[in-house]
Image (cartoon, rainbow, N blue to C red):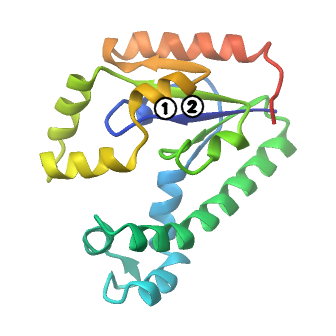
Amino acid sequence: MFVLGLTGSVAMGKSTTARFFAEEGVPVHDSDSVVHRLYENEAVPLIEAAFPGTTADGKVDRVKLGSRVMGDLAALRQLEAIVHPLVWDAERRFLEEAQAKGVPVVLLDIPLLFETGGDSRVDAVVVATAPAEVQRARVLERPGMTEQRLQAMLARQMPDSEKRLRADFIVDTSRGFEDARAQVQEILRKVATMPKRT
């Protein structure tokens, strides 16, 4: 089984790229979706214990938690120490199930793939990208997004230029859906003949 890792900075079209892989029949493990699920289940008591007052009605209040850890590196590391092992457990189960089914290719959608060392767990890395002005316009269209929040998010992420240098494949999402879908199809054609790295 060939394991692809997908990453990309905020508003670079990563989720859309993941959807195109799924449409080609590739099982996708979405780390963000796992975190959302954890914030309504097993992570709740752990986060409440570490950050009192950031949960309500059995769920993590993402706004309160975000304001608690934003700009506080120690708090962010503490949160990651709680959440990352739970996400990795879910990822391991996903890979085991796919392997048991004989799936040829899977995709791990991990926003902080390089930042968390996730690239060591995959056979090849796909980076979704777009020009900086396209990224900025997309981000600032989101509800509640400000220039300050954008800068804080970018500060946590490896620069797009570095991600592109470390990528095995790049999907430029600035040229429309059909073009991006064609790029995904081409990646899958190449992957079919590539040796596994992990």
Q: Quadrant of residue 123?
A: top right
Picture residue at 40% right of the left edge, 74% below the top: 75
Q: Is residue 84 above or below residue 133?
A: below
Q: Secondary structure at mark 1?
A: helix
- State which quarter of the image contains the C terminus: top right
Q: Quadrant of residue 129?
A: top left
Q: CA distance from mark 1 to mark 2?
A: 5 Å
Picture residue at 32% right of the left edge, 81% below the top: 54
Camera-side residue of 161 and 195: 161
Numbered tag placed on residue 19 in the rendering: 1
- State which quarter of the image contains the N terminus: top right
Numbered tag placed on residue 22 in the rendering: 2
Q: Secondary structure at mark 2?
A: helix
**Residue 129 shown left or right of residue 11 in the figure:** right
Q: Are the two marked residues, 1 and 2, in contact with CB atoms closer than 8 angstroms?
A: yes
Q: Is residue 122 above or below residue 38?
A: above
Q: Quadrant of residue 86?
A: bottom right
Picture residue at 52% right of the left edge, 22% below the top: 165
What type is the residue that disc 2 sits on?
A: Ala
Camera-side residue of 154 and 178: 154
Where residue 67 sits in the image (x, y, percent)? 25, 70
**Residue 100 shown left or right of residue 38 in the figure:** right
**Residue 196 shown left or right of residue 122 in the figure:** right
Where residue 122 sits in the image (x, y, percent)? 71, 37
What type is the residue that disc 1 sits on?
A: Arg
Q: Label 1 neighbourhood size at 10 Å, few (<14), some (14-19), many (20+)?
A: some
Numbered tag placed on residue 100 in the rendering: none
Where residue 21 sits in the image (x, y, percent)? 56, 27
Where residue 34 sits in the image (x, y, percent)? 53, 58
Q: Label 2 neighbourhood size at 10 Å, few (<14), some (14-19), many (20+)?
A: some
- Count of numbered badges drawn on the protein: 2
**Residue 87 shown left or right of residue 133 in the figure:** right
